[in-house]
Structure formats: structure tokens, C-alpha cells
Image (cartoon, rainbow, N blue to C red):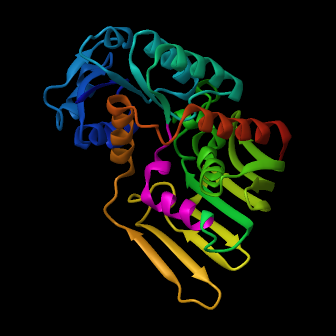
Amino acid sequence: MTIRWGILGAAKFALNHMAPAIHAARGAELAALASSAPEKAEAFRAFAPGLRLHDSYDALLADPGIDAVYIPLPNHLHLEWSLKAIAAGKHVLTEKPMTLKAAEFDQLIAARDASGLVVAEAYMIVHHPQWQKVRDLIAGGAIGRITHVDTAFSFDNGAEPGNIRNRPETAGGGIRDIGGYTYGSVRFAAQAEPGKLQARIRHENGVDVWAQVVGEMVGPQGGFTYSAITSMRLFPRQEVVFQGETGLIRLTAPFNAGLFGEAQVELHRAGATSELFRYPAVNQYVLQVEAFGRSVAEGVPYGCPLEFSRGTQAMIDTVFAVAEAI
């Protein structure tokens, strides 16, 4: 079965990452794009020459030749158009954050369950084998009980005031853009949930541009301390370190693997030779599309269900609620 995909909006991220991934994925066809700017479609047609162009999102949702839609719109539009796509009978993959509040996920979960469609947030890292390896290493006791986790994700877009991440009216900000990675990745790999958290946030023009979160998380092995930095005003950095009683796991390109650097997992253990697991040729966006397609065609459980995404959004909500402005 080939899943025929449509994309709502000619977003740069869609052009550079998800549209090529849909085109390259097994069992997927990039069939249509909705955009009011026909000239933008030409860049997509460079690798998908048969692409149909619709001049509105509603027109694409009404297209009977589309099975699934990918939604890369600005954050404040994600929930609205996800619900509209479900109502139109389309499977839905929407960029994170899929909602702006955890409670809003309840609408999506109810609509998914009532429709029988596959509906998910585009949280691609859980499909990457480096994160599946880390999850398995932790669960297998490779570093003993986790005692502390450090996460960091930063870049600098301060010279782009028009960027939707720098605009409050589009629900921008660093936490909504990249906090889902520094928070959700630990939830996924350590199977942990946050306990007591503290946060400090610096704002510019109504959006958070720097945030530090410290506190506790609790997993199957017990509690551990946690620290996270996210920023849209720092030199690019990505790193996650899981510190255990008997070892350490470090990811050096945890989130934009293949773009920020080669995906690598370092395993250091007391009294043992360090191990390095490399993933030089993995495209996590292609893996995400293929996993979604298997869920649609074969009923295979999707690796990032809405319930998981709701939990990460709940952690984001908590960070905003407890944060001290600086």
C-alpha cells in the first residue's frame, strides 16, 4: 500500500526535510501541496514533478487522492488544522508542538479514537536508532541506576526578527521549538516523568529566548536530578548526557542528527573499554514517514502516540508555570 501525502503550506522546513523524506520513504508518495503562492511549489516539484498544487488548505483536505497530511504550519495553527484534517478523513502528522497546552491533546485523542485514523506529532527522534539504543542500554542496566541527566539545545536566530520562532503571535519561543527535545528525549529514553522542577526564563519581544530548567525526574529505577538548557541566542550546541552509578552515556548530535553532526552514542563504564555506536547514514525523517505508513497500512503501533506527546507538553506547561523571569 502506498500512502499518498499532502502538505499544508510551503514551509521551509517542509521543503528542506519532510517533503524530501516523504518522497524518499518506502510506501509513500508526495502527491499534493497547499499554498497560495504557486512559485513556491516549483521547489517541491524539483524532486516531485507530479505534485498537485491546491490554492487553499481546505481544497487539499477535500482532495480524494490524499490519504495523509503533514502539517508544518506555525505553532498556533497546529491544533485547528489537525482537527480539520481528521474531520476530512485524513491521517495526520503534525509538527510539534501539536498543541499549546497539554489539555488540548484530549480533543485530538478523542477525534483519533472516534475516527480510527492515525494521528501523531512529528517527533522524529524516537524513530532514530541512536535513541532506541540509548533506551535499551538504560533499561538493560548498562550504566546502573541513573543519577543525573544533562541536556542542552541551542542556536542563534537573533538576526531574524521575522522568524516565526521570534514572534509571540505565532506562539514562538525556544521552549516550544526545542524544549520538546530536551524534555521529551529524557522521558523517552529513561521512561521517566518530571517531579519537582524549577526554571528561569529570559524573554525578548514576548518570547522565551533562553531557559534553564533544573529539578528531579522519576523513572523505573527511581529518581534522578535533571538539568536542561534551551536557547535561541547561544552558539549552536546539542548534547545529552545520562550519568549512572556505574557509567555514562553521551549523545553528541541527539536532535538534528546528520545536520548538526554524525549521530554517535558514547558508552563509558567503570572498568570497561569505552564503546562508540555510530549512525552515519540514518535519516530520521524518512524513518518517521515509514513508521507512520506502517501504522496506516498495517496497524503497527506508532512509536510516538499522542499520549506520549501529551506528557511532554504537560512538562512544557509545568516549566512555564514555575518559571522565574530574569
Residue at 32% in and 19% down: 35
The answer to which image quadrant residue 110 occupies is top right
Spot occupied by residue 270 in the image (x, y as percentages of width and height): 65, 87
Q: Nearer the viewer, residue 165 or 149?
A: 149
Whole-percent x and y of residue 10?
35, 28
User: Is 117 one of the magenta-colored residues?
Assistant: no
Q: Is residue 281 left or right of residue 1?
A: right
User: Which residue is at 39% across, 43% downward?
Assistant: 288
Q: Is residue 223 left or right of residue 260?
A: right
282 or 76, which lies in front?
282
Occupied quadrant, residue 207: top right
Residue sitting at x 42%, y 65%: 261
Give the image location of residue 7, x and y in percent: 34, 25
Q: Is residue 127 above or below residue 246?
A: above
324 in relation to 82, above or below: below
In the drawing, does residue 315 fall left or right of residue 68?
right
The magenta stretch is 122-138
- Going by the image, does 281 lie left or right of 307? left
Looking at the picture, how far across and down is residue 54, in whole percent? 27, 14
Residue farthest toward the bottom in the current orientation of the protein: 271
Q: Nearer the viewer, residue 20 or 121?
A: 121
Magenta part, dominant SS:
helix
Above or below 49: residue 131: below
Would residue 237 be seen by someone viewing this image from the given angle? Answer: no
Is 128 part of what is drawn in magenta?
yes
